[in-house]
């Protein structure tokens, strides 16, 4: 462990290095009969759409992240009645013909600019914590954004596993899952201390050290900014239920009942630590006046999935696969079996359903259909225990307008979302 540096100002020793740790308690997480609606992944090219359909209108479907467009989108999100915007954290994209996620606005710039052009919606940003970035820097940047927004900040903590990104920061990675979440645990404790402490603090962790560290202004949110995490593994869920407030989850079978079971499990894990959490789901939305019209758009997009981008995503996510997955076609000639050639598996060895799910929403829960159908699905998930919905659209400008004019009015008619937060 490093020794205390000469010249460091006095600091109070951190009371703990790992969670659960909630100085001052947790932020408010729920409002009765209210579905928290977020616009997600608006800050990166193509969002969650890995389909060459985005090239049909590049400005609307791929490059909506550019600020002249995105600034108008943020105002529209607020006017429509959304609760928050949530940025997608990205250091390197996935290429392909569409340049999927290859360009976008960073976590600090996007959040600050969004705060400046809105007055009410939550400003939820995303930070990766494994790249040797000091908690002091992250705490200061986010505290200032919270100040600018008037206390509307939320922070999505990601324990990154992308080897390409580690290399960009000059690191060899990713480390083991245990280490990645241990880093996240220390980082989160340090952020909470810096956001809430009146006095300088000393923090002597395994991965981070600070001496006499203090930020001013401290976080404006009370008791502190909301913390979010997307976790699936037991290790990840253990960290998230000890330290975070909202958890993005997926159901193993991607059904409403699957979400109900997952929500019950996670609430139970949080309760063991004397904490509460809000269950959140990432959703990909294609909707129209009728189910048939929406599904027509879906089929058009599915037919143009960017295979190269999906292959890169799978490789970097560590999910698999021999990217040269092939299907060999044989024929019998006399008594011998002769190969007549090999063709690439169009689904990269993961199957049609998984492949299309990645292309149409990066594995998100798919909300495809009429406005009534989408409202029904949102309510069903809410009743199953999902409290927050991070919505991503093929056409975000149209999607926000459709939510404003059609889906949110249906929710209000049925007794939900009567107030805005």
Image (tube, helix red, strand yellow):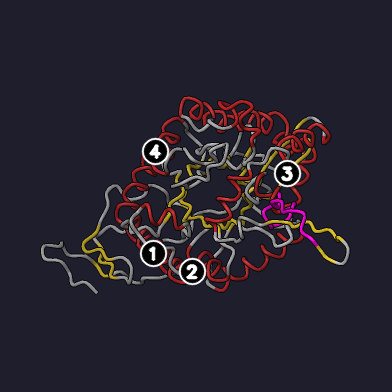
Q: Quadrant of the C terminus?
A: top right
| Pointer 2 with pointer 1, Cβ within 8 A | no
Which tag, 4 or 3, sits closer to the chain's start? 4
Marks 1 and 4 sit apart, C-alpha to C-alpha, by 24 Å
| Pointer 4 with pointer 3, Cβ within 8 A | no
Marks 3 and 1 sit apart, C-alpha to C-alpha, by 36 Å
Res 21 quadrant in image: bottom left
Which mark, by number, is residue 367? 3
The residue range painted magenta reads: 338-353
Marks 2 and 3 sit apart, C-alpha to C-alpha, by 31 Å
How crowded is the residue under tag 4: few (<14 C-alpha within 10 Å), some, or many (20+)? few
Give the labeled residue for mark 1.
Answer: 189
Res 40 quadrant in image: top right
Which tag, 3 or 1, sits closer to the chain's start? 1
Query: Looking at the image, is mark 2 or mark 4 nearer the viewer?
Result: 2
Which tag, 2 or 3, sits closer to the chain's start? 2
Res 289 quadrant in image: top right
Q: Quadrant of the N terminus?
A: bottom left
How crowded is the residue under tag 1: few (<14 C-alpha within 10 Å), some, or many (20+)? many
């Amino acid at each position: 462990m490093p020794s205390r540096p000469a010249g460091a100002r006095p600091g109070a020793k951190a009371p703990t290095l790992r969670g659960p740790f909630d100085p001052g308690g947790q932020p408010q997480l729920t409002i009765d009969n209210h579905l928290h609606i977020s616009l997600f992944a608006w800050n990166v090219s193509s969002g969650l759409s890995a389909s060459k359909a985005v090239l049909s209108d590049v400005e609307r479907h791929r490059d909506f992240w550019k600020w002249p467009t995105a600034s108008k989108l943020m105002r529209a999100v607020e006017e429509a009645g959304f609760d928050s915007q949530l940025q997608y954290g990205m250091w390197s994209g996935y290429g392909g013909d569409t340049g999927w996620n290859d360009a976008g606005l960073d976590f600090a710039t996007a959040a600050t600019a969004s705060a400046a052009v809105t007055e009410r919606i939550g400003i939820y940003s995303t930070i990766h914590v494994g790249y040797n970035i000091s908690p002091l820097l992250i705490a200061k940047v986010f505290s200032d954004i919270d100040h600018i927004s008037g206390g509307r900040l939320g922070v999505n903590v990601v324990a990154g596993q992308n080897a390409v990104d580690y290399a960009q920061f000059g690191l060899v990675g990713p480390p083991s899952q245990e280490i990645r979440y241990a880093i996240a645990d220390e980082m989160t404790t340090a952020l909470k201390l810096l956001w809430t402490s009146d006095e300088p603090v000393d923090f002597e962790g395994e991965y981070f050290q600070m001496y006499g560290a203090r930020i001013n202004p401290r976080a404006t949110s009370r008791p502190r900014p909301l913390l979010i995490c997307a976790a699936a593994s037991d290790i990840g869920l253990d960290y998230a239920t000890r330290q975070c407030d909202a958890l993005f989850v997926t159901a193993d079978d991607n059904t409403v009942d699957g979400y109900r079971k997952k929500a019950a499990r996670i609430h139970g894990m949080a309760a063991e630590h004397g904490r509460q959490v809000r269950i959140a789901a990432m959703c990909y939305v294609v909707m129209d006046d009728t189910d048939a019209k929406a599904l027509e758009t879906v089929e058009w997009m599915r037919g143009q999935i960017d295979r190269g981008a999906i292959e890169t995503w799978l490789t970097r996510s560590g999910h698999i696969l021999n990217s040269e997955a092939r299907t060999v076609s044989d024929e019998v000639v006399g008594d011998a079996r002769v190969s007549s050639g090999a063709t690439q598996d169009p689904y990269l060895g993961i199957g049609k359903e998984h492949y299309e799910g990645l292309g149409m929403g990066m594995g998100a829960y798919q909300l495809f259909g009429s406005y009534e159908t989408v409202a029904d699905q949102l309510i069903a998930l809410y009743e199953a225990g999902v409290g927050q919905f991070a919505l991503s659209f093929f056409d975000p400008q149209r999607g926000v307008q459709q939510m404003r004019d059609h889906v949110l009015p249906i929710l209000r008619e049925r007794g939900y979302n009567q107030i805005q937060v």
